[in-house]
């Protein structure tokens, strides 16, 4: 049996899964106590591995934050001697020290199994040709999927990011069946296919997209599937938790299974830090329970989601979380209203006359905050069709007002007007912060 395909584990009864989690948590606390950071934290709070008798005891432990990783940069959270570390990943560190994540060889092997498990779950096999359009290097999306696809046994194409025409040449020449791709870049790639006169559905063998690394709406996923004739599965990961593969959709496409033999999941009120009722949105907090080099205890991800309580028809018993609503630090407050960019995207993607590129600007005009939403038109509508544009603009404004509870300025612009990105899309510019 393949290491990554473990039916008994993936369909384990909840009581057995929680027993496994408790055993691994106790070992994790013991391992973490070797790290200078946790050695200090545990001593200050009179905590140790002996403090764990059930999963409920985890709530006695303090949270870990990104600032802790930065303060103890670079190796203050290493729970093994550095000679046992075989790889390091880090964030860009544009605002102070980067966050560093360390891996032993066992950590890398487990991570590869975890990603391969996700890929197998959505139907990928060793007969697939898997093309990875993520950047390689410090960003975990490249190497994480690379090693996972290799563990699966698929033929891998490490194309890396950018250069759309080369990506398409590889897809055509190598018979690529599956892509790992940013959702915003998937829409850009669809446009380049169209520019080249290639019918993706007829002229390629693409069937499966693994999409993630940036928040996206269900409406955007559906547009990607319609444009490219593929099934697009949502992937969630973050460097602090290894990288891609923390959670993944199954073929049901109704929430992401979060692998509870690798992490313990909490969803808490971001303000009170108390558990949220099932089905209500809160901050995702994760504790690793299958890592050697750098275990993290109650790590505050800042990502917002909720538990999906209904049993999954696929038979897997690991809990599901809903599509991420965004990050708590991505939330915009305009005229006292809390708004997430994904709320705006959800509305825009429902209009067939609109393209998929949009940009949000917030500025102070006089004494009032104003939001402007620029969105490109599709190729099927002319920029000089004033009557149609006025009607379209009014309807978009009305639906946005119903969703976000304030009235934005909507500007419809010609296709190709807004900047295109082959990396993570930048959707918001808040000019108020520049004053």
Image (cartoon, helix red, strand yellow):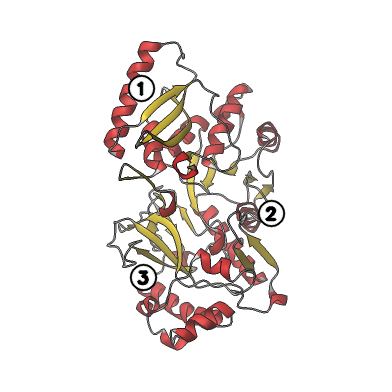
Q: Considering depth in this image, is 193 or 77 the residue closer to the camera?
A: 77
Nearer the observer, disc 2 or disc 3?
Answer: 2
Question: Residue at image x 39%, y 55%?
Answer: 304
Asked which secondary structure carries label 1, the reply is helix
Q: CA distance from mark 1 to mark 3?
A: 50 Å
Q: Considering depth in this image, is 323 or 23 the residue closer to the camera?
A: 323
- Image-quadrant location for residue 410: top left
The x and y percentages for residue 166 are: 70, 34
Q: For residue 351, say whether it is visible.
A: no
The x and y percentages for residue 301 are: 46, 61
Answer with mark 1 or mark 3, whichever residue precedes in sequence.
3
Left-right relation of 176 to 266: right
Compared with 129, 140 (above or below) is below
Question: Residue at image x 53%, y 54%?
Answer: 120
Quadrant assignment for the N terminus: bottom right
Answer with mark 2 or mark 1, whichever residue precedes in sequence.
2
Which dot marks residue 407?
A: none
Q: CA distance from mark 2 to mark 1?
A: 43 Å
Q: For residue 118, say whether it is visible.
A: yes
Compared with 343, 417 (above or below) is above
Q: Which residue is mark 1?
A: 393
The x and y percentages for residue 267 are: 36, 63
Answer with mark 2 or mark 3, whichever residue precedes in sequence.
3
Q: Are marks 2 and 1 in contact (CB under 8 Å)?
A: no
Compared with 206, 34 (above or below) is below
- Image-quadrant location for residue 394: top left
Q: Considering depth in this image, is 352 or 92 the residue closer to the camera?
A: 92
The x and y percentages for residue 95 are: 58, 56
Q: Which residue is mark 2?
A: 137
Q: Which residue is mark 3?
A: 14
């Amino acid at each position: 049996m393949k290491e990554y395909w473990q039916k008994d584990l993936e369909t384990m009864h909840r009581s057995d899964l929680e027993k496994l989690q408790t055993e691994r948590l106790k070992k994790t606390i013991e391992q973490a106590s070797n790290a200078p950071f946790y050695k200090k934290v545990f001593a200050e709070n009179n905590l140790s591995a002996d403090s764990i008798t059930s999963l409920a005891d985890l709530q006695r432990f303090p949270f870990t934050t990104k600032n802790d990783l930065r303060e103890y940069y670079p190796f203050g959270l290493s729970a093994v001697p550095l000679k046992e570390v075989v790889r390091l990943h880090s964030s860009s560190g544009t605002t102070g020290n980067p966050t560093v994540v360390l891996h032993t060889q066992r950590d890398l092997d487990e991570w590869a199994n975890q990603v391969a498990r996700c890929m197998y779950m959505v139907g990928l096999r060793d007969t697939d040709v898997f093309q990875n359009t993520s950047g390689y290097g410090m960003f975990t999306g490249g190497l994480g999927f690379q090693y996972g696809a290799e563990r699966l046994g698929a033929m891998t194409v490490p194309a890396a990011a950018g250069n759309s025409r080369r990506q398409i040449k590889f897809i055509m020449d190598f018979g690529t069946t599956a892509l790992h791709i940013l959702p915003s870049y998937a829409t850009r790639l669809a446009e380049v296919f169209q520019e080249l006169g290639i019918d993706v559905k007829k002229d390629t063998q693409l069937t499966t997209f693994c999409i993630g690394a940036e928040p996206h709406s269900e409406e955007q996923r559906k547009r990607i599937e319609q444009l490219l004739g593929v099934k697009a599965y949502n992937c969630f990961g973050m460097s602090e938790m290894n990288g891609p593969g923390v959670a993944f959709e199954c073929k049901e496409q109704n929430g992401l299974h979060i692998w509870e033999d690798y992490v313990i999941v909490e969803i808490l009120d971001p303000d009170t830090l108390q558990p949220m009722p099932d089905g209500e949105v809160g901050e995702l907090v994760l504790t690793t329970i299958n890592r050697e080099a750098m275990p993290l205890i109650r790590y505050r991800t800042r990502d917002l989601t909720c538990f999906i309580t209904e049993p999954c028809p696929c038979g897997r018993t690991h809990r599901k979380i809903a599509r991420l609503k965004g990050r708590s630090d991505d939330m915009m407050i305009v005229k006292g209203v809390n708004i997430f960019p994904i709320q705006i995207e959800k509305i825009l993607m429902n209009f067939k006359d609109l393209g998929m590129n949009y940009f949000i600007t917030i500025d102070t005009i006089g004494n009032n905050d104003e939001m402007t939403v620029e969105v490109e038109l599709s190729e099927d509508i002319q920029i000089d069709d004033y009557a149609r544009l006025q009607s379209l603009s009014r309807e978009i404004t009305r639906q946005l007002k119903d969703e976000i509870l304030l009235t934005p300025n909507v500007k419809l612009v010609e296709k190709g007007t807004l900047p295109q990105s082959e990396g993570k899309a930048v959707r918001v510019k808040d000019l108020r912060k520049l004053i």
